[in-house]
């Protein structure tokens, strides 16, 4: 959500919350991204909405903002500040997500205190200009095989129609932008994604 006009993103967020999303991450990057006071104000608006629906509010990369507004957590990438220092800064109660691409990086993320890892891009994506090459689901499957209890979130180009292979590979959840934000009916799009996620959570529970 890198738009200067905060009204539409907030409307989309509320629709997504009504549709059943279980976590929201503010990723404010790119040429039109908000900064400074405007970014903080927008983050607080998103945070209030998430609180109304009992959904965790996570900020991408900006640890200072997380501490300043007391967000529920932060997500960092391999090229961001070292995760072990992030964990020390935010304490043990907040959520820490870390982007990983290999088993070794997953191992380090666990050592650094990650609550979950994000893996991708699974499919081609247009919402992240600095995205790494498409990875598919093979590495998700490998990491899930080595660390079966580690929550893995699939990222990149995921929709309700192509989510099945991501869950089948071992992901616990999925992260989306376009599948909801670009939909003519964000609430319904979120509802469909939530239904797919719930289906796989149920099936995995039965199989276990």
Image (cartoon, rainbow, N blue to C red):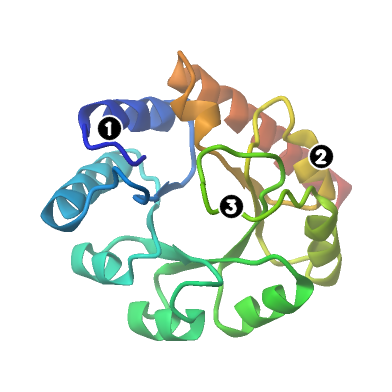
Q: Which residue is mark 1?
A: 10
Which quadrant of the figure contains the N terminus?
Answer: top left
- Which mark is nearer the camera, 1 or 3? 3
Would you call the spot at circle 2 few (<14 residues within 10 Å), some (14-19), or many (20 or more)? some
Q: Which residue is mark 3?
A: 131
Q: Earlier in the sequence, mark 1 or mark 3?
A: 1
Q: Give how far across and how far down residue 35 sits, in percent.
A: 21, 54
| Image side of residue 167 versus residue 76, left or right | right
Q: Looking at this view, is 88 or 199 the one in front?
A: 88
Q: Give how far across and how far down residue 54 sits, in percent.
A: 36, 45
**124 w.r.t. 91: above or below:** above
Q: Give how far across and how far down residue 92 sits, in percent.
A: 42, 79
**38 w.r.t. 181: above or below:** below
Q: Residue furthest left?
A: 37
Q: Residue at x 75, y 38 (%)?
A: 200
Q: Residue at x 66, y 49 (%)?
A: 121
Would you call the spot at circle 1 few (<14 residues within 10 Å), some (14-19), or many (20 or more)? some
Q: Quadrant of residue 93?
A: bottom left
**31 w.r.t. 14: above or below:** below
Q: Residue at x 69, y 73 (%)?
A: 106
Would you call the spot at circle 3 few (<14 residues within 10 Å), some (14-19), or many (20 or more)? few
Task: Estimate the spatial distance between the alpha carbons at disc 1 and disc 2, rounded to whole Å.
Answer: 31 Å
Asked whether the residues under the numbered discs 1 and 3 touch, taking CB atoms below 8 Å apart as contact, a structural biologist would say no
Q: Which residue is mark 2?
A: 165
| Image side of residue 126 versus residue 31, left or right | right
Task: Estimate the spatial distance between the alpha carbons at disc 3 and disc 2, rounded to whole Å.
Answer: 20 Å
| Image side of residue 13 versus residue 84, left or right | left
Q: Earlier in the sequence, mark 1 or mark 2?
A: 1
Asked whether the residues under the numbered discs 3 and 2 touch, taking CB atoms below 8 Å apart as contact, a structural biologist would say no
Q: Give how far across and how far down residue 197 sits, in percent.
A: 66, 37
**150 w.r.t. 104: above or below:** above
């Amino acid at each position: 959500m890198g738009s200067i006009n905060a009204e539409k993103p907030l409307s989309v967020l509320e629709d997504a919350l009504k549709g059943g999303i279980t976590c929201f991450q503010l990723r404010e990057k790119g040429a039109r991204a908000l900064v400074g006071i405007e970014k903080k104000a927008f983050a607080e608006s998103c945070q209030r909405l998430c609180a109304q629906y009992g959904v965790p509010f996570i900020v991408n990369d900006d640890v200072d903002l997380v501490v300043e507004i007391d967000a529920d957590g932060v997500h960092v990438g391999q090229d961001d500040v070292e995760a072990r220092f992030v964990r020390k800064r935010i304490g043990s109660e907040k959520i820490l997500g870390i982007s990983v691409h290999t088993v070794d990086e997953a191992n380090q993320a666990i050592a650094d205190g990650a609550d979950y890892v994000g893996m991708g891009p699974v499919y081609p994506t247009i919402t992240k200009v600095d995205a790494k090459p498409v990875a598919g689901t093979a590495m998700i499957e490998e990491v899930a095989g080595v660390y079966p209890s580690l929550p893995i979130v699939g990222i990149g180009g995921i929709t309700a129609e192509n989510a099945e292979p991501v869950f089948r590979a071992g992901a616990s959840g999925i992260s989306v932008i376009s599948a909801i934000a670009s939909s003519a009916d964000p609430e319904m799009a979120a509802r469909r994604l939530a239904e797919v996620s719930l289906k796989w959570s149920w099936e995995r529970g039965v199989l276990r």
